[in-house]
Amino acid sequence: MVIAEQKTELSILLIEDDLVDGESITRSLHKAFPDCDVRRATCLGDALAVVNESKFDVVLADLSLPDSRGLDSVVSMVHACPRNPLIVLTGHADDELSITAIAEGAQDYLVKGRINPELLQRSIRYAIQRHTMSRNNEQLLQTLRERDLLLQTKNSKLEKACRTAQKFVDNVSHEFRTPLTVIMEYASLLEDGIAGPVSEEQAKLLGVIDDRASDLNNMVDDMLDVSKLESGLLGASRCQCTVAEIIEHVLPAIRRKAMVRDVRLELQIDDDLPDVFCDSAKVGRVIVNLAINAIKFTRSPGQVCISARRHGETDVSIAVTDNGVGIPADRQREIFHRFAQVKTEVRDSTKGFGLGLNIAQELVEINFGKMDVESTEGVGSTFSFTLPVNNPGEVTRRFVDRLAEVPDGPQSVSAIGVVLEEDASESAVLDVERFLVHILRQNDLIFPLPNRQWLLLVSVPTIALEEFLARLDTERQQINRNRPRGPLPDFRVEVHGTWDVAQRATEIVTMVNQQLVQEKCCVA
Amino acid sequence: MSSVVTQASQARKRPLQQVMRARMSKRIESKVGKDLLARSAMTHTPRILCIDDDPEICRTLEMRLSAYRAEVQVAYFGTQGFWEAITDHPDLILMDVSMPSGDGRFVLESLRNNQATRRIPVIVLTGMRSPELRSEMMALGADCFLNKPVHFDVLLREMQAFVDLSKRDPTSH
């Protein structure tokens, strides 16, 4: 970058058709910059010819030339020599013209009668400096644009690669399950004596086949979960759920495994437990993982207890207790790491990947709960986790806390209201909710409000909010095209505001509470 | 085939709510009317259609249900399954999702858009774990969504919500 103050041997092009004015300005120029070299042109055509031949530090141009008048001269000059700063000269003061000339790309505007060496010196220096800076800016902007484009291309390629990889894992796991299903089903079919009588010993062996195949199936589930957790594609459809129902849903599989391994399974679910706010399928996976671990590590006679009780004002705690080997105190944190498994002599052959606990912990965190372990060596272990009760204010508080904790996580949360038109049927309302849940990622939250409304808390930076809204619109159009029953009912999307997670966390909670209260009032 | 397709697109215009209500009442009927069904069970053997491209899966179901008073039909791809359904009117359909020549979505949509098969309960059985697929199939009108591998006792319990399955008399077997 050339700093004007440091250069005194300036090369200047003066375009002026009036000889007297030209002489006077040239004199002033030599006074202002004694070592400067002034080249003169009398019309725009000549000027354009020389500008291309040699380099000038600055161009001074009269606005009224024989072959061009007024702003046209400015436009032509700026166009012809974008690398030279241009100072416009004119016979009379005209503010409007001067502003327009500068808008067209001139650096300064001088009235001929009032030109003196000091003014020229200052004007030329500033013009050169400003011009250099603005060219520099343009270059930076250009680089930025190119980088942005490059990043966008790379990003979309990565996203595509990520989705392809995920799709591949999905397909592979599906392909795994088909033979597994057949193996398990034939084993249990034979065990049940459906293909002919089997001895007690044979039935037991067939039971083992079935059991181990189901282990393999769980490992496939684990792999699927890990790949989704890693790629960030894991969605979370959290909503109001009943604890007993979640447990009941996964119980048959746990019960069967306990039976095969001769483990007594006990169940203690407190009455009058409040409903929780979570993704029931993911919580079910956590219970299965903990229970399988417990069953694996009990000592004969094995005993495993699954319990659920209230935990303080705002949580329900679900615990799985075993009478197993226990975990040494210094290793109790480590077991939650991926692929970690406590070195143990017991049933070495029953080891899985060691993914179970790590996944369980991550799935609990996605559901705004905390995982805990209490264990005494030689006595047994209790793995427990909490889930927030269905209280939107409390859930929002944890949601915001979680966002703040994630390193390089989202900095801000936007509240978006979705309002459905009046005449939608109940199933259409459900379909819209399903669509909204589908659009959200694990770091977003959705609360159904009465009156066919939803409140979405979306954790995208302010700058990407438009992008999110655009995605919502694109996906809506896509679904509308492919939906067998015709388009989804129309809904309105309103952005209520954006909050900084670190600084205005409490405001987000207050806002959610207000929204809910407002809506309840409306209904009443 | 063309007549079926035309019929389907006409049926689509029926308000969804009406369809849902009809399905709900059908389900309630089938549960409430179990005592009534029990008496006619001697004469009516439930017919179950299994649509799965893996013949072994169909076979395990046939073997399992051979101990029950039930008739099992099988189809190995989507369009075949749909045809079996409209010609034979089974009492219950078990169906896979990813199949050649007409996947589960297509079959379910066709079944629900056809007057003759609209009310047949459908249990979807798939190895895919995606919650989106589950909601999608339920929205298309599936009555139940189970993940493979499923243990027969779980499947049996689900089937019994729709049809009356009683064990065969071992002496007659």
Image (tube, grey):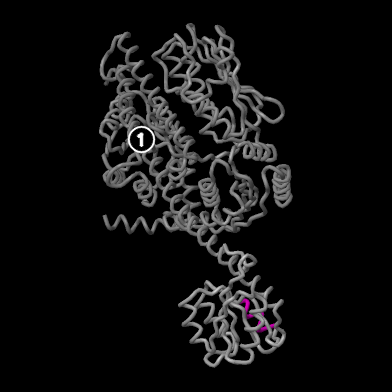
Residue at 58% x, 85% y: name it: A71
Expressed as whole percent of the image width and height from the top left, the position of residue B33 reads 46, 35
Quarter of the image for the N terminus of chain B: give it: bottom left
Q: Specify whether residue A98 is painted magenta.
A: yes
Viewport quadrant of the C terminus of chain B: top left
Q: Residue A468, how many percent across, how many down?
A: 55, 53
Q: Which residues are magenta?
A: A95-103
Which is the main secondary structure of the residues drawn in magenta? helix
Rendered location of residue A370, percent (x, y): 61, 28
Residue at 30%, 27% (x, y): give it. A182
Amino acid bearing label 1: His
Q: Is residue B121 visible?
A: no
Up-down relation of residue A42 to residue A231 (above or below): below
In the structure shown, which secondary structural element does the residue marked by tag 1 occupy?
Answer: helix
The residue shown at (45%, 77%) is: A53
In the image, B45 versus A388, the foreground residue is A388
Residue bearing the label numbered 1: A174
Q: Is residue A243 left or right of residue A158?
A: right
Residue nearest the observer in this picture, B63 or A407? A407
Residue B171 seen in this snapshot: yes
Quick one: label 1, few (<14), some, or many (20+) residues within 10 Å? some
